[in-house]
Amino acid sequence: MKQFFRFCLVGALGFVTDFGVLYAVVKGLGLGPTSGRVVSFLVAATVTWKVNRHFTFVKQDAGSVREWLQYLAFTGVGGFINVAVYQTWLWFTDHSTLNLFLGVVAGSAVALMFNFVISKRAVFAERRAVQ
Protein backbone atom coordinates (compact mmCIF):
# COMPACT_ATOMS: atom_id res chain seq x y z
CA MET A 1 0.00 0.00 0.00
CA LYS A 2 2.91 2.32 0.79
CA GLN A 3 4.29 1.74 -2.70
CA PHE A 4 0.92 2.53 -4.29
CA PHE A 5 0.67 5.74 -2.22
CA ARG A 6 4.14 6.78 -3.39
CA PHE A 7 3.19 5.90 -6.96
CA CYS A 8 0.15 8.18 -6.60
CA LEU A 9 2.33 11.02 -5.26
CA VAL A 10 4.66 10.63 -8.22
CA GLY A 11 1.59 10.48 -10.43
CA ALA A 12 0.51 13.84 -9.01
CA LEU A 13 3.90 15.26 -9.94
CA GLY A 14 3.50 13.69 -13.39
CA PHE A 15 0.05 15.21 -13.70
CA VAL A 16 1.32 18.71 -12.86
CA THR A 17 4.19 18.23 -15.31
CA ASP A 18 1.84 16.86 -17.97
CA PHE A 19 -0.65 19.69 -17.73
CA GLY A 20 2.03 22.38 -17.31
CA VAL A 21 3.84 21.28 -20.47
CA LEU A 22 0.53 20.83 -22.32
CA TYR A 23 -0.56 24.35 -21.42
CA ALA A 24 2.83 25.79 -22.37
CA VAL A 25 2.99 24.13 -25.78
CA VAL A 26 -0.68 24.66 -26.70
CA LYS A 27 -1.11 28.21 -25.43
CA GLY A 28 2.51 29.36 -25.69
CA LEU A 29 3.83 27.59 -28.78
CA GLY A 30 0.57 27.14 -30.66
CA LEU A 31 0.65 23.35 -30.98
CA GLY A 32 -2.69 21.60 -31.31
CA PRO A 33 -4.19 19.79 -28.34
CA THR A 34 -3.24 16.34 -29.66
CA SER A 35 0.37 17.06 -30.64
CA GLY A 36 0.71 19.08 -27.46
CA ARG A 37 -0.47 16.10 -25.45
CA VAL A 38 2.11 13.81 -27.07
CA VAL A 39 4.88 16.23 -26.06
CA SER A 40 3.50 16.67 -22.55
CA PHE A 41 3.11 12.90 -22.08
CA LEU A 42 6.73 12.22 -23.09
CA VAL A 43 8.05 14.86 -20.69
CA ALA A 44 5.80 13.69 -17.84
CA ALA A 45 6.65 10.01 -18.45
CA THR A 46 10.36 10.80 -18.27
CA VAL A 47 9.91 12.67 -14.99
CA THR A 48 7.80 9.88 -13.46
CA TRP A 49 10.23 7.17 -14.59
CA LYS A 50 13.12 8.85 -12.83
CA VAL A 51 11.20 9.66 -9.64
CA ASN A 52 9.42 6.28 -9.47
CA ARG A 53 12.68 4.40 -9.87
CA HIS A 54 14.26 6.13 -6.86
CA PHE A 55 11.27 7.02 -4.64
CA THR A 56 8.56 4.43 -5.28
CA PHE A 57 10.51 1.31 -6.24
CA VAL A 58 13.80 2.36 -4.54
CA LYS A 59 16.38 1.47 -7.15
CA GLN A 60 19.87 2.62 -6.23
CA ASP A 61 21.55 2.70 -9.63
CA ALA A 62 21.03 5.50 -12.13
CA GLY A 63 18.94 3.46 -14.53
CA SER A 64 19.61 2.93 -18.19
CA VAL A 65 18.37 4.10 -21.53
CA ARG A 66 17.06 0.56 -22.03
CA GLU A 67 15.00 0.71 -18.83
CA TRP A 68 13.69 4.20 -19.75
CA LEU A 69 12.67 2.94 -23.20
CA GLN A 70 11.03 -0.11 -21.62
CA TYR A 71 9.16 2.19 -19.22
CA LEU A 72 8.02 4.36 -22.13
CA ALA A 73 6.92 1.29 -24.10
CA PHE A 74 4.94 -0.26 -21.25
CA THR A 75 3.47 2.98 -20.00
CA GLY A 76 2.85 3.91 -23.62
CA VAL A 77 -0.06 1.50 -23.42
CA GLY A 78 -1.23 3.37 -20.33
CA GLY A 79 -0.50 6.55 -22.26
CA PHE A 80 -2.64 5.33 -25.13
CA ILE A 81 -5.48 4.71 -22.68
CA ASN A 82 -4.83 8.13 -21.15
CA VAL A 83 -4.82 9.97 -24.47
CA ALA A 84 -7.85 8.04 -25.78
CA VAL A 85 -9.88 9.15 -22.77
CA TYR A 86 -8.52 12.71 -23.20
CA GLN A 87 -9.47 12.75 -26.90
CA THR A 88 -12.92 11.39 -26.13
CA TRP A 89 -13.39 14.14 -23.55
CA LEU A 90 -12.36 16.82 -26.05
CA TRP A 91 -14.62 15.33 -28.72
CA PHE A 92 -17.61 16.09 -26.48
CA THR A 93 -16.41 19.48 -25.20
CA ASP A 94 -14.72 22.67 -26.36
CA HIS A 95 -10.95 23.20 -26.05
CA SER A 96 -11.08 25.68 -23.18
CA THR A 97 -8.35 25.54 -20.54
CA LEU A 98 -10.81 23.93 -18.12
CA ASN A 99 -11.65 21.15 -20.58
CA LEU A 100 -7.98 20.54 -21.39
CA PHE A 101 -7.44 20.18 -17.64
CA LEU A 102 -10.45 17.90 -17.12
CA GLY A 103 -9.39 15.76 -20.09
CA VAL A 104 -5.97 15.25 -18.52
CA VAL A 105 -7.63 14.40 -15.18
CA ALA A 106 -9.91 11.80 -16.77
CA GLY A 107 -7.15 10.21 -18.83
CA SER A 108 -4.75 10.07 -15.90
CA ALA A 109 -7.31 8.49 -13.57
CA VAL A 110 -8.22 5.72 -16.01
CA ALA A 111 -4.59 4.83 -16.73
CA LEU A 112 -3.37 4.97 -13.09
CA MET A 113 -3.99 1.36 -12.10
CA PHE A 114 -2.67 -0.08 -15.35
CA ASN A 115 0.53 1.95 -15.03
CA PHE A 116 1.09 0.94 -11.40
CA VAL A 117 0.75 -2.78 -12.10
CA ILE A 118 2.95 -2.71 -15.21
CA SER A 119 5.61 -0.63 -13.43
CA LYS A 120 5.67 -2.92 -10.39
CA ARG A 121 5.55 -6.22 -12.28
CA ALA A 122 7.59 -5.47 -15.40
CA VAL A 123 9.68 -2.31 -15.39
CA PHE A 124 10.96 -2.15 -11.81
CA ALA A 125 10.58 -5.84 -10.87
CA GLU A 126 13.53 -7.43 -9.15
CA ARG A 127 15.53 -9.39 -11.70
CA ARG A 128 16.45 -12.85 -10.44
CA ALA A 129 19.61 -14.48 -11.63
CA VAL A 130 19.11 -17.51 -13.84
CA GLN A 131 20.61 -20.60 -12.16
Image (cartoon, helix red, strand yellow):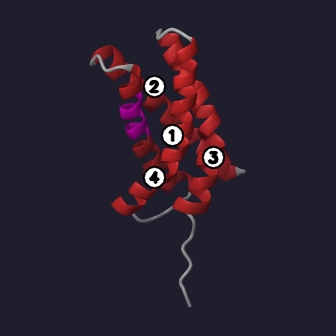
* Disc 3 + disc 2, Cβ < 8 Å: no
Q: Residues within 10 Å of mark 4 (few under 14, many from 20)?
A: few
Q: Could you say where residue 93 lies in the image, as x and y percent from the top left?
A: 55, 11
Magenta-tinted stretch: 37-44
As displayed, is residue 86 above or below residue 48?
above
Residue designated by label 2: 19
The question of residue 5 being in magenta is answered with: no
Label 1 near label 3: C-beta < 8 Å? no
Q: CA distance from mark 4 to mark 3?
A: 13 Å
74 with respect to 24 (left or right): right
Q: How far, Cα to Cα, is label 4 from label 2?
A: 21 Å
Which residue is nearer to you in this view: 89 or 57? 89
Q: Residue at x 45, y 31 (%)?
A: 18
- Compare marks 4 and 2 and give the one earlier in the sequence: 2
Mark 1 and mark 2 residues within 8 Å of each other at the beta carbon: no
Distance in Å between CA atoms under marks 3 and 2: 20 Å
Q: Residue at x 57, y 33 (%)?
A: 108
Q: Earlier in the sequence, mark 4 or mark 1?
A: 4
Front label number (4 vs 2):
4
Crowd rating for badge 2 (residues with CA inside 10 Å; few <14, some 14–19, many 20+): many
Q: Which of label 3 and label 2 is nearer to you?
A: 3
Label annotation for residue 73:
4
Q: Label 3 is placed on what type of residue?
A: Phe
The amino acid type found where label 2 is placed reads Phe
Image quarter of the C terminus: bottom right
Tell me which numbered mark, 4 or 3, is placed earlier along the sequence.
Answer: 4
For mark 1, does the 10 Å Cα neighbourhood hold few (<14), some (14 to 19), or many (20 or more) residues?
Answer: many
Residue lying farthest left?
Answer: 29
The earlier-in-sequence mark between 1 and 2 is 2
Which label number is shown at residue 114? 3
